[in-house]
Image: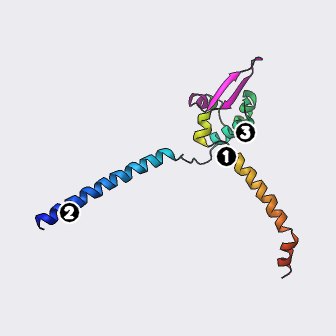
């Protein structure tokens, strides 16, 4: 290989490396911006229920945990991870609500929205299925 072609090859390699570095930087930025989608788990489901309710009394949350066979220490773990806030009412009852962090990181509130869209589409599908226009195809 001549020195001219060797120099050209080195320039191409440097250009490729710079381009790869830029691409890797762009990928890191995209990964930082896109929320990580988490599979549904019991924690997310319970937090979703608290979120939909707005707030939940401790007794009710204990009942939901007992139904799933989850220890009551789960609540403390969610409070320490800043997914649940707690406060006491004037009559000494303890209430919990989800934090903005939990809503943002676990995408809470989207499950209820998708469920309502699904029920809307089921009704529309059922109406269409029983329509006179559809009955024409049944007679073919």
Q: Which residue is mark 2?
A: 9
Is residue 97 one of those drawn in magenta? yes
Q: For mark 2, give the secondary structure.
A: helix
- Residue located at (75% from left, 31% from top): 60
Q: In the image shown, does 60 or 133 lie closer to the viewer?
A: 133
Picture disc at residue 92: none
Upstream in sequence: badge 3 or badge 2:
2
Which residue is at the far right? 132
* Mark nearer the viewer, 1 or 2: 2
Is residue 16 positioned above or below 50 on the image? below
Q: Which residue is mark 1?
A: 110
Instruction: Read off the magenta span.
Output: 76-99
Q: Tell me the CA gap for discs 3 and 1.
A: 10 Å
Is residue 45 positioned above or below 13 on the image? above
Task: Look at the numbered discs 1 and 2 and tell me whether their residues touch, using CB distance below 8 Å.
Answer: no
- Residue located at (75% from left, 28% from top): 59
């Amino acid at each position: 290989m001549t020195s001219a072609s060797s120099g050209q090859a080195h320039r191409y390699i440097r250009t490729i490396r710079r381009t790869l570095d830029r691409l890797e930087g762009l990928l890191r930025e995209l990964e930082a911006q896109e929320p990580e989608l988490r599979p549904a788990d019991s924690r997310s489901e319970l937090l979703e229920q608290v979120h939909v309710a707005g707030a939940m009394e401790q007794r009710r949350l204990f009942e939901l945990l007992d139904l799933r066979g989850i220890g009551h220490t789960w609540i403390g773990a969610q409070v320490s991870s800043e997914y649940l806030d707690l406060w006491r009412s004037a009559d000494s009852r303890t209430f919990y609500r989800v934090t903005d962090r939990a809503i943002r990181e676990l995408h809470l509130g989207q499950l209820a929205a998708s469920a309502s869209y699904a029920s809307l589409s089921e009704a529309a599908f059922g109406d269409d299925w029983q329509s006179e226009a559809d009955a024409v195809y049944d007679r073919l």
